Amino acid sequence: MEIIKITGLKKYYGKQRGVEDVSLTVNQGEIFGFIGPNGAGKSTTIRTMLSLLYPTAGEISLFGMDIRNSTVKIAEKVGYLPSEVAYYEGMTVKELLYYSASFYKKDCSNKIAELSSLLELDLSKKIEDLSYGNRKKVGIVQGLLHDPELIILDEPTGGLDPLIQQKFFTLLQEENRKGKTIFFSSHILSEVQRLCHRVAIIKEGKILKVSTMKSLREENYKKITVETKDSSRELFMHLPGVKDLTEKEQELKFMYKGNLKEILSQLQTLDLQNLLIEEPSLEEIFLHYYEKEEI
Ligand SMILES: Nc1ncnc2c1ncn2[C@@H]1O[C@H](COP(=O)(O)OP(=O)(O)OP(=O)(O)O)[C@@H](O)[C@H]1O
């Protein structure tokens, strides 16, 4: 089942481009990453999905329901962590969380206790006395306390220390195992690489690519390192699909996109000491898409 379906989304703030052309679908049970640099349009897309912004053009449905007609029904099923959390001051963490829970027609107290304990959040503290990271934790508990079917997170880990980040990722994976769908934006590519089944890459308001992590890696350049006593630079320098070639003593490194058989037939002619063929990291893939005008 398609949990998120965005078709031809465009959002302008007056004359300022928010997003230009966003279409994507997310299926039930997926962990979907939304990646792009600052200003690419991630938060705009998310805020429009949540009906916090009105789209200039395009259609969005969540759980098969048009967001314009089913705001309340959808809100019950969705948990959201904004990139910046802002709170009324003067309340304790517990008061704030129970106030948030009062909007849902269910008892959220067990979930509040479970999440706060996992994230080591002190419920008795006043909101205004919390550090940035602890405020973020309040946002996480607030987003998840009603046990939502769809969890939408906008840059979720900013301000969390590595230990809590790790606990938070484990929590997301557990929620996902229970069938929850997770959509999250990030520019921390290592976390996307670790968690996501599929990703969408957005640049200047347009989706460049939607792909599984696996095919994103496979379709891309391979990193090849060759160790040989033969002089091999000439052999690879002009070969189609080879780029970024560097040579240091007996080690030759380059990126290769093309038929592996072809490159292997060239490699066979050498007296090889060592050979390494690696898939690129998401970071390298991301840079590759951003260097190019078109794909
Ligand atoms: N309230 C607003 N008024 C005018 N322009 C806005 C507003 N909010 C966002 N924009 C513009 O829309 C574009 C997309 O911004 P958005 O915040 O969606 O990007 P982002 O990918 O979430 O970036 P970041 O990673 O920095 O959060 C940017 O050019 C931004 O300046």
Image: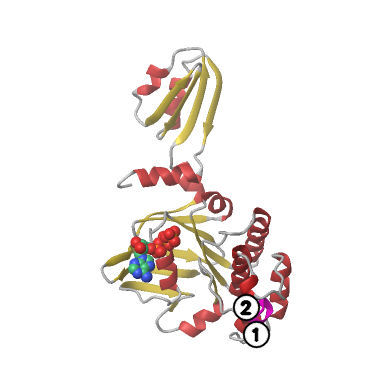
Q: What kind of residue is marked 2?
A: His
Task: Judge left or right: residue 240 versus residue 27.
Answer: left
Q: Are marks 1 and 2 in contact (CB under 8 Å)?
A: yes
Q: Quadrant of ligand 1?
A: bottom left
Residue 254, x across and y down, in percent: 44, 28
Residue 7 in view here:
no
Residue drawn at x 55%, y 81% is 76
Residue 6 falls in which quadrant of the image?
Answer: bottom left
**Rendered image: mark on residue 106:** 1
Q: Which mark is residue 255?
A: none
Judge whether 135 appears above or below 260 on screen.
Answer: below
Q: Residue at x 25, y 68 (%)?
A: 15
- Which x, y percent locates residue 137? 63, 67
| Front-lying residue, 41 or 221 | 41
Residue 251 placement (x, y as % from top left) = 50, 20
* Residue depicted at x 44% and y 13%: 231
Up-down relation of residue 8 to residue 272 (above or below): below
Is residue 71 in view? Answer: yes
Marker disc for residue 146: 2
Mark sitting earlier along the chain (1/2): 1
Instruction: Magenta stretch: give its range.
Output: 92-97
35 on left or right of 140: left
Reply yes or no: does residue 95 show up in magenta: yes
Tell me where residue 157 appears, x and y as whole percent: 57, 59
Q: Nearer the viewer, residue 265 or 221?
A: 221
Q: Secondary structure at mark 2?
A: loop
Residue at (74% x, 68% y) in the render: 117
Say left or right for 96 vs 55. Answer: right
Coloring scheme of the render?
A: secondary structure
